[in-house]
Image (spheres, rainbow, N blue to C red):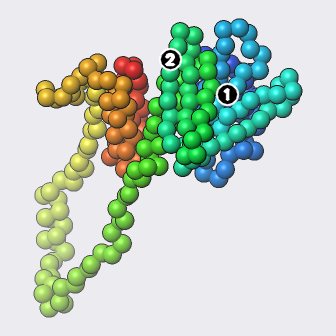
Amino acid sequence: MKEQFKKFLNEEQDPKAIEKITSKLNDLLMKGEEVGYIAVQKKPAITVFPDSIVLTNKRIIICKPKNLGLSMDFTDYTWDDIAGAFVKENILGSEFSFNTNTDLSISIDYIPKIQARKIYTYAKEQLDLFKNPVTIPAPVSEIIQTEEPEDTVEEVETEEVTNFAEIIPATTPSYTETFEPISQTQSTGERKLSELSKEELFDKLQNYKKLLDNGLILQGEYDTYKKEILSYM
């Protein structure tokens, strides 16, 4: 199994199901398409060929094995086709569902709760990015250069320049970037994460995603924010 798909085995995913899906994904992914998360159905009874759902930065792919696992049906829905995503937690697992703009409702049940929360959060992020694209200002492409008239250039003897340079030691400024978890950076007027509702937590996570896309925070900072917010959901 490829290294980039091993991260999808952290929330009780069936390794055989992940391996079967990822072996076929290389032929399905479009140019520039990246897998964000894979959730695998886990029914109370032993399920030899569970259904799976793959979320990428371009679409949702429903994977359903058939013919005793020898083949698989793939149904995909691009993010511009999706109107909304939902998750319902039951006693045994959760049900993830989404609606399309044509009033079609698709759902997969018996998804482990932590997997359902992950795909719900990822779906909310992608839908928010699609509906509210972040525009990055164009970089300044022109630099105005000015030249002083030749008659204003003051000649300095080589010896004087050398002596002057020796007086001022060369120093290199150093910058140390520090980062503290959200729980340590809450202002006195801001509520703690434990006091926020799920919707408020999702909105907070989406805001950090926008900061990451704008280059205002690093990937490591975003991952820390995301991990801490998800721990309260």
Q: Position of residue 150 (x, y in %)?
A: 19, 90
- Residues at discs 2 and 1 in contact (Cβ within 8 Å): no
Q: Position of residue 231 (x, y in %)?
A: 39, 19
Q: Residue at x 36, y 19 (%)?
A: 232
Q: Residue at x 36, y 72 (%)?
A: 141
- Disc with the residue nearer the chain's start (2 vs 1): 1
Quarter of the picture holding the N terminus: top right
Quarter of the picture holding the C terminus: top left
* Left-right relation of 232 to 99: left
Q: Residue at x 72, y 44 (%)?
A: 28
68, 182: nearer the viewer? 68
Q: CA distance from mark 2 to mark 1?
A: 17 Å
Amino acid type indicated by mark 1: Ser
* Left-right relation of 220 to 195: right
Circle 2 sits in a helix, a strand or a loop, which is it? Answer: strand
* Left-right relation of 19 to 174: right
Q: Position of residue 31 (x, y in %)?
A: 65, 53
Q: Is residue 172 above or below residue 24?
A: below
Q: Look at mark 2 in the image and give the residue it sits on.
A: 89
Q: Residue at x 61, y 29 (%)?
A: 107
* The disc label shown at residue 52, or none: 1
For the question of whether residue 224 can be seen, the reply is no
